[in-house]
């Protein structure tokens, strides 16, 4: 839901799990550019996720994950305070084009580099991760 400064509903947007727009009802001329997980949907139909572009139609990023490109350089530890061995324990992390290790119901990718747990997931579900 997008509201104006008075709290009036101006746009109602809903998404499929991988970010394809399911519903986009514009009640005024206003069109929110920041859509799925807060990323800008540009004219090409791709989301700009800061570090790279994401295509919700194919459910993949269109370029290699910068974290994967920098494995062994200390990038992961310096930028995210994560150890390489922990990152490599999940083989899906090496699929450098996948969106949130193919689990968009539990994770989001706020910057195009690394997944984080979605706050919408229940505590029980988060414990399983």
Image (cartoon, rainbow, N blue to C red):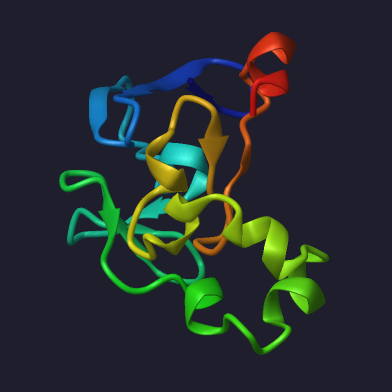
Q: In the figure, is residue 120 to the left or right of 26? A: right
Residue pictured at 56% horizontal, 27% vertical? 4
Q: Nearer the viewer, residue 100 or 120?
A: 100
Residue pictured at 44% horizontal, 45% vertical? 101
In which quadrant is the C terminus drawn?
Answer: top right
Q: In the figure, is residue 45 to the left or right of 41? A: left
| Residue sitting farthest toward the bottom | 73
Q: Position of residue 107 (x, y in %)?
A: 55, 36
Residue pictured at 57% horizontal, 49% vertical? 115
Q: Quick check: 90 above or below 69?
A: above
Q: Position of residue 2 (x, y in %)?
A: 49, 26
Q: Quick check: 84 above or below 114?
A: below
Mark count = 0
Q: Position of residue 34 (x, y in %)?
A: 46, 46
Q: Position of residue 45 (x, y in %)?
A: 20, 53
Quarter of the figure with residue 43: bottom left
Q: Quick check: 120 above or below 84?
A: above
Q: Quick check: 37 above or below 128?
A: below
Q: In the figure, is residue 15 to the left or right of 57? A: right
Residue pictured at 43% horizontal, 51% vertical? 92
């Amino acid at each position: 839901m997008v509201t104006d400064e008075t709290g009036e509903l101006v746009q109602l947007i809903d998404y499929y799990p991988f970010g394809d727009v399911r519903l986009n009802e514009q009640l005024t001329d206003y069109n929110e550019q920041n859509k799925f997980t807060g990323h800008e949907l540009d004219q090409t139909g791709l989301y700009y996720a800061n570090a790279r572009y994401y295509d919700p139609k194919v459910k993949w990023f269109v370029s290699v994950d910068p974290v994967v490109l920098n494995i062994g350089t200390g990038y992961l530890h310096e930028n995210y305070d994560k150890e390489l061995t922990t990152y490599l324990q999940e083989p899906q992390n090496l699929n450098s084009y996948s969106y949130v290790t193919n689990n968009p119901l539990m994770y989001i990718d706020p910057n195009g580099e690394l997944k984080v747990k979605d706050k919408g997931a229940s505590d029980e579900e988060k414990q399983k991760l």
